[in-house]
Image (cartoon, rainbow, N blue to C red):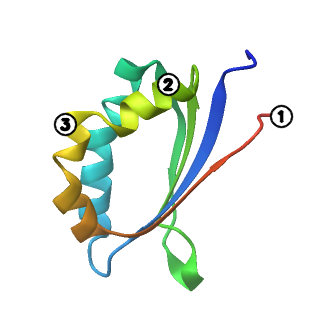
Amino acid sequence: MTDAELFLCCFLWAAPGEEAALERYEDRVLAFVAEHRGAVVQRARSDGADGRPNEVQLFRFDDQGALQAYLGDPRRLALADERDRVVARTELFPVTPL
């Protein structure tokens, strides 16, 4: 791990009835991560019961610039309407691997 390297955790909640669509959307946009000096370290799904997120993701990016390049990827941005339709809530926060 380098000083500039970033690890992030993302919690995603699907819009009601859009759980499968959320998964399909994430399949599409997560395919772009590696092109921006990043990696999806882990991806897990829950049943979303009791307010839990439907999906949890752990990312690694080489640095802040790599993360910003992914977030600004025109292909990802072109899917914003789909994202707004299927994702009810997102929490993204830095973490430190143990």
Residue at x-position 18% and y-position 60%: 82
Q: Sort mark 3 into few (<14), some (14-19) or many (20+) by Cα contacts within 10 Å.
A: few
| 76 lies above or below 61 | below
Residue 62, quarter of the rendered image:
top right
- Decide: marks 2, 3 in contact (CB < 8 A)? no
| 55 lies above or below 74 | below
- The disc at residue 65 is 2
- The disc at residue 98 is 1
Mark in front: 1 vs 3:
3
Secondary structure at badge 1 equals loop
Figure disc tally = 3
66 or 12: nearer the viewer: 66
Position of the N terminus by quadrant: top right
Q: Is residue 1 left or right of residue 81?
A: right
Residue 11, quarter of the rendered image:
bottom right
Mark in front: 2 vs 1:
2
Residue at x-position 38% and y-position 32%: 70
Query: Mark 3 highlights which residue?
Result: 75
Q: Amino acid at mark 2?
A: Gly
64 or 6: nearer the viewer: 64
- Decide: marks 1, 3 in contact (CB < 8 A)? no
